[in-house]
Amino acid sequence: MPSRFRINSVHIFPDDSLISEREHMTPVMGQPVKLPEPVIRADSETDRNGATFPSVHFDEEAQLFKAWYTAQRRATERHIGEPLEDRNAPHLLAYAISRCGVNWEKPDLGQFEFNGSAANNICDSVHAESVVIDPHDQDPARRYKRFMYDSSKRALHLLLSPDGLHWTWPTREKPLFQTWDVVHDTNFLMGWDEPLGKYVAFLRPPVSLTPQPQRRIGVSMTDKVLDWPAPKVILEADESDPKGIGPTNKKRDMDLYQMTGFRYGQGFLGFLLNFDAHLATDFNDPIYATLASSADCLHWQRPMRSRFLSVGNPGDFDGGMVYPNCRPIEFQDELYIYYGAYPQFHAGWSPAHTAIDPDLKPSIGLAKLRLDGFVGLYTNPYPGRMVTKPIEADGSVLLVNCIPDSRNGGWLKAEIQDEQGVPIEGFTIDDCLPVAEDDLYNEIIWSSGKSLGELRGRKTKVCIRQWENVFYGFRFAD
């Protein structure tokens, strides 16, 4: 971000919930660019059968990326015997660090002995489904939190840590949830959301059995992190989703497998995993990510069903399934999206396969996305126009993220209107100097010389007009 600006609010348009009028501006899905190779590989004894389910954070003070991931140390996926003893755990919690987010180190933590040595990066003997850093909790011993699903007892647990490396387990004897009648696996802890005043988690409710078995997405919110209500169903496959026949020749449509939800701008986005279970007869059932959006975290939309983060080509390290398991990280004006990467499809993969073919190991990939670039509004061939619903003008500067097509004279202009849609003097389209540069922070300037600061705190509408341009959103700044 340019140092001369302080961002006050971010407005993006993954759906029409903030839009009152839109014409000749077509939504187009953003295109994350995946690095061609994994950034964290299963290349040590402790993760010799796979490295996946990443939770990645950027420590601003230390200027350091920190990753927690599930290390698959055994070729058996399920727990055997007493599941959560170190000698039997098939999954461990591993830790890695990076200065750039691409080249990673696995530090020797000296905490858990493995094959006669504690020189490894294991920080707990039970795996993670998500790790969050919680500045809201005033207890320093509870600054880090994570979910862990015990598949042998079908129980969801919460673990706590002061530093992300030394963990306690307050729910060991009394899980948050137990039995499939309440919650299944593949859950995501979003953490504390200040505007909602709640901890938020996206959980898998009981599988719907009518008219056929299907996974769904639920949300649970609480102000007491050790006491969660049962999840409320917020998303499930509908008539617009693919249909098919499953491996037993019974009707089997697409499932919504898991969702990683996070706040972005004035609302929420979700990396929603789509599971094409109806393709399992050919052992070709990929899991890939689409986008979901919500204004309040309770009512979710899927206006665009196309793939946001897709699987790679056959033979690629992510050619079968991709699991974006953590919120994107803003770094050097890009969004870094880390994901668990599987070379095989859902029906064709098992941890035991990695003992036979090392190329089948899951790993962790990275995709980079333009800042705010989840969904763009594209105009061609007619001039486009969009007007927002009333929003508070909370800055002296309006910054616009867009890509005008310089080959065809593309441009964008902005106008500020009152709540009734009447242009405000000095902030009209005619006053606006056209933006013609591809930039994340194009400053809107009106020839009247007026400053947007004159309207601070006032409810206004922002009108965008454009030609041969992709518009991603705007920010109020000072």
Image (spheres, rainbow, N blue to C red):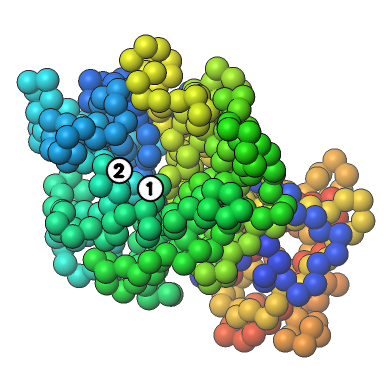
Q: Amino acid at mark 1?
A: Asp
Q: Residues within 10 Å of mark 2 (few under 14, many from 20)?
A: some
State whether residue 169 appears in this view.
yes
Out of 263 and 279, give the one closest to the viewer.
279
Give how far across and how far down residue 341 sits, in percent: 46, 31
Q: Quadrant of residue 119?
A: top left
Q: Residue at x 48, y 53 (%)?
A: 207
Q: Which residue is mark 2?
A: 151
Out of 167 and 472, give the one closest to the viewer.
167
Give how far across and how far down residue 162 sits, in percent: 16, 55
The answer to whether the residue labelled 1 contacts the one labelled 2, judged by CB atoms less than 8 Å apart, is yes
Dot 2: what SS?
loop
Labels 1 and 2: the sequence-earlier one = 2
Q: Amino acid at mark 2?
A: Ser
Give how far across and how far down residue 356 sits, in percent: 37, 11
Q: Residue at x 38, y 66 (%)?
A: 230
Q: Which residue is mark 1?
A: 185
Image position of 318 (left or right of 81): right
Q: Quadrant of residue 179?
A: bottom left
Image position of 391 (left or right of 287): right
